[in-house]
Image: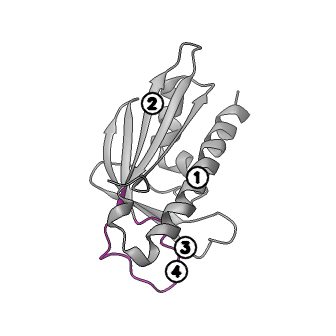
Amino acid sequence: MTATDRIERSIVLKAPRSRVWQALTHAPEFGTWFRAHLDDQVFVPGRQARGAIAYPGYEHLTMEVTVEKMEPEHLFSFRWHPYAVEPGVDYSAEPTTLVEFRLQDTDAGGTLLTVVESGFDAIPSHRRDEAYRMNSGGWEEQMRNIASHLHEEA
């Protein structure tokens, strides 16, 4: 595994672990802060969830994930094709990356949320670097998005 095989980002959220878990695993709410239309979707291990992306400039794309694990209030994970943004390209034969969201209580009463996306070394070489770079920045933004989402309701 190389240094560019995985992305890891963490943030301390001022919300109890049960609330962060809901924001991650209730598909419509996940879609709200992640910016994807998942209103009629349900996250279930072994099943795919999909919806149109609502992020400006990417509205022509569909977010498609296959849920791997849901260990209540500890681990939520899915697989997807990273930065699969080229119109008309079929990414289905490519390997996927694994996205894991891990939750831990903090001493201050909040929740430490860590996201790890791994498996970039298996992505075809012609798009590996860009997928890694774009998702690396993307996870930084998504950590801010979930923090804002949870903070707005406090």
Q: Which residue, given by chain and number where applicable, does mark 3 sit on?
A: 61
Query: Could you say whether the residue bearing mark 1 is in a helix, strand or loop?
Result: helix
User: Where on the picture, by quarter, is residue 116?
Assistant: top left
Give the Cα separation between the discs numbered 4 and 1.
Answer: 20 Å
Residue 95 lies in the magenta-colored region? yes
Determine the residue positioned at 69% across, 39% down.
Answer: 148
Determine the residue positioned at 64% across, 34% down.
Answer: 150
Q: What is the crowding at mark 1: few (fewer than 14 residues within 10 Å), some, or many (at least 20)?
A: many
- Looking at the rendered structure, the kind of residue marked 1 is Phe
Q: Position of residue 19 (x, y in %)?
A: 53, 29
Q: Which residue, given by chain and number where applicable, does mark 1 sit on?
A: 34
Closer to viewer: mark 4 or mark 1: 4
Residue placed most toward the observer, 85 or 68: 85
Q: Position of residue 32 (x, y in %)?
A: 61, 50
Which residue extends farthest bottom? 88
Closer to viewer: mark 1 or mark 2: 2
Determine the residue positioned at 49% across, 61% down.
Answer: 132
Q: Which residue, given by chain and number where applicable, does mark 2 sit on?
A: 103
Q: Which segment is the magenta one?
A: 81-97
User: Where on the picture, by quarter, is residue 107?
Assistant: top right
Give the Cα separation between the discs numbered 1 and 3.
Answer: 14 Å
Residue placed most toward the observer, 94 or 151: 94
Q: Which residue, given by chain and number where applicable, does mark 4 sit on?
A: 86
